Amino acid sequence: MAWADEVAVGHVLVTPESKYDEVRTALGRFPEANGLGVAEAYQRRGVARALMAAAADAAGRMGAVRLGLAVEPGNEAAGRLYESLGFDRHRLEVVDIWHWIDDDGVQHEQGDRCTYWTRAVGR
């Protein structure tokens, strides 16, 4: 979590391994960053960079030598950020499945095709 005073302004989740079977099969097992988000009022202030640095540190503390993440192809801003942080895009594509509930309380499942990226982390 990222905080400004006592207000949460950003988040990222680091899991011990990828949630995608195809990543674990093709690239092995290593931590993965998911759900990076920054409140709109705090975007472009370095919060996402700080969160991703913390994610890389967490992966290193887990004993990993790399960190992975998935990016929707149309999310060019995220791609530029991750590239500037040393992530490399793989040819591997994954489908990120997520659920949401509409205003009527009906649950929906959605799948977004994503590219997969990794970067080295220190131990």
Image (cartoon, grey):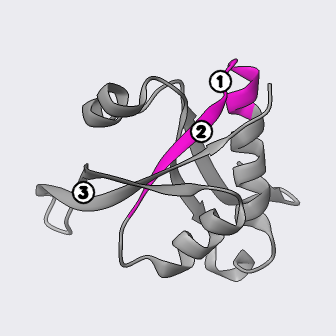
Q: Pick the residue in front: 3 or 95.
A: 95
Q: Quadrant of residue 21?
A: top left
Q: Position of residue 61 (x, y in %)?
A: 76, 22
Q: Earlier in the sequence, mark 1 or mark 3?
A: 1
- The reply to whether dot 2 and dot 1 touch (C-beta < 8 Å) is yes
Q: Position of residue 45 (x, y in %)?
A: 80, 76
Q: Which residues are magenta?
A: 58-71
**Badge 3, how many Cα within 10 Å: few under 14, some, many 20+?**
few
Name the residue: 67% across, 30% down: 59
Name the residue: 35% across, 35% down: 23
Q: Position of residue 116 (x, y in %)?
A: 41, 52
Q: Amino acid at mark 2?
A: Leu
Q: Quadrant of residue 81?
A: bottom right
Q: Amino acid at mark 3?
A: Trp
* Foreground disc of the pair 1, 3: 1
Q: Secondary structure at mark 2?
A: strand
The residues bearing labels 2 and 1 have C-alpha atoms spaced at a distance of 7 Å
Q: Secondary structure at mark 3?
A: strand
Q: Earlier in the sequence, mark 2 or mark 3?
A: 2
Quarter holding the C terminus is top right
Q: Amino acid at mark 1?
A: Ala
Q: Secondary structure at mark 1?
A: loop
**Badge 1, how many Cα within 10 Å: few under 14, some, many 20+?**
many
- The residue pinned by badge 1 equals 64
Disc number placed over residue 67 in the picture, else none:
2
The residues bearing labels 1 and 3 have C-alpha atoms spaced at a distance of 32 Å
The residues bearing labels 2 and 3 have C-alpha atoms spaced at a distance of 27 Å
Disc number placed over residue 91 in the picture, else none:
none
* Foreground disc of the pair 2, 3: 2
Disc number placed over residue 100 in the picture, else none:
3
